[in-house]
Amino acid sequence: MRRTLAVLMVAVTSMVALAFLVPLALIVKETAQSRAVANAERQASALVPVLALTTGSDDLGHAMARTEAGRRGLLAVHVEGGATVGTSRAPAAEVSGAAAQTRAGTVPLDGGYALLRPVALDGGRSAVVEVFVPADDLNRGVFASWAVLTGVAVVLVIGSVLVGDRLGARIVRAARRLGTAATALGSGDLSERIHPDGPPELQAAATAFNSMASRVTHLLAAERELAADLSHRLRTPLTALRLSLDQLGPQAESSRQALARLEGEITTIISAARRPSRAARSCDAAEVLRERLAFWSALAEDQGRPWELIGAELPVRAPVPAGELTAVVDALLGNVFRHTAEGTAFGVTLHEGRDVVGILVADAGPGIPDPEAALERGASGSGSTGLGLDIARRLAESTGGSLRLDRSSLGGAQVQVWLRTDGDT
């Protein structure tokens, strides 16, 4: 923007300068020429009193020597019926024609102009005073004046560029602050606010941004409280379930342990929901998978499901927060337990490529009859909410990756979540 404003200032100031300076330069040239001709007329008029008294060559020569034009050899006097005194440059025909006139005139010659001033003498005679005006006299001071005008134009253009650059810098700073604040807010910093500055339009945009950020903060706080309240409501049926399990005696110990883990997860959800999200933008995918498989392994053991985790021995960085990746893994494993029979095997594979991280969840169930319909948000043919695959898809697409459904080597469905890492900083 600063460059655009600078170019605009150069263009506008240049056009304005040309509109004024070109006519002014022509006026300067015409003024210099008029001044040179007027000076020649004054020197010619200085000889008129002398011609009224005498036409002698010696007297005229002495009078001419007292003038600047005469000393420079630019003056001549043509007396009718007499000799020409001085150096004449004008053609004889022009001199004869000028003698019949009543006012002075100019004749263009090589290297300048000749001013012919007729003078009426006694006895009906006439004389013509010739003053040669060289081209240097006609243009004296013109080029210096043009140089000054050019310097003024350059100063005006440079000044306008500096003013435009300052204005552009103010606008650019305000716009950059607004963009930086928007980026910070999009990254999860809900405390980001900016001081309105710059032109009125950007000040209005900054005020609107602050209002939007405050509104988003309030809405997210309300959603966190709602999520926490909904999660807290689960404690009542869980308490009733715990009382029922306590009545069953030692044979229900495994169920009580599973219930304790469930209560722990709900407590974690309530705490996370009420805490403003400031999660890191990346996590160790291998650690997340090991943790979640350790949680689901208890239920898999109860249902007699063989399972395996492949590729999670070493740290693998994923460009998503650990909480979001945990939600995706839980959703995909929950689908396996929900939509396949007890005893069905499943496996999770972690794949790390140069620009991508892949999480593959496979099972030995019946597969997915209609993959396209299964990817539609809220669509499910098995009595569930239909949001599990959509959660995984949105997380993958947030990194530039994708979600794919395929047939697994176990014979059932395979859900592939590919997270791109090349655009992550």
Image (cartoon, rainbow, N blue to C red):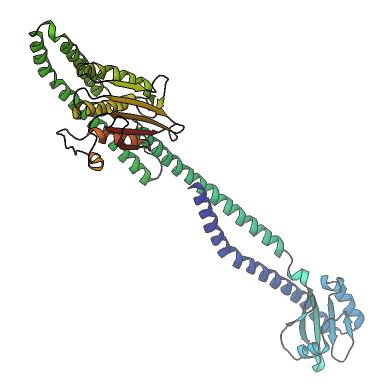
The residue nearer to you, when weighing 194 against 190, is: 190
Residue closest to the eye, 353 or 363: 363
Q: Quadrant of residue 124 in the image?
A: bottom right
- Residue 344 lies, with reference to residue 160, above or below; the image says above
41 to the left or right of 276: right
x and y percent of residue 406 in the render? 31, 37
Quadrant into which the C terminus falls: top left
Residue 335 vs 240, above or below: the answer is below
Q: Seen from this angle, which residue lies furthest top? A: 250
Q: Residue furthest bottom?
A: 124
Specify the quadrant of the image occupied by residue 247.
Answer: top left
Q: Quadrant of residue 390?
A: top left
Where residue 306 appears, x then y in whole percent?
27, 20
Specify the farthest residue to the right: 58
Numbered disc total? 0
| Residue at 80% across, 85% down | 128
Residue 126 visible to an observer of this rendering: yes
Query: Residue sitting at 87 percent across and 71 percent down?
Result: 71
Q: Is residue 149 left or right of residue 209?
A: right
Residue 115 or 43: which is nearer the viewer?
A: 115
Tell me residue 258's x, y (percent): 19, 14
> Where residue 125 appears, x then y in whole percent?
81, 92
**Does any portion of residue 278 appear in the rendered image?**
no
For residue 314, above or below residue 217? above
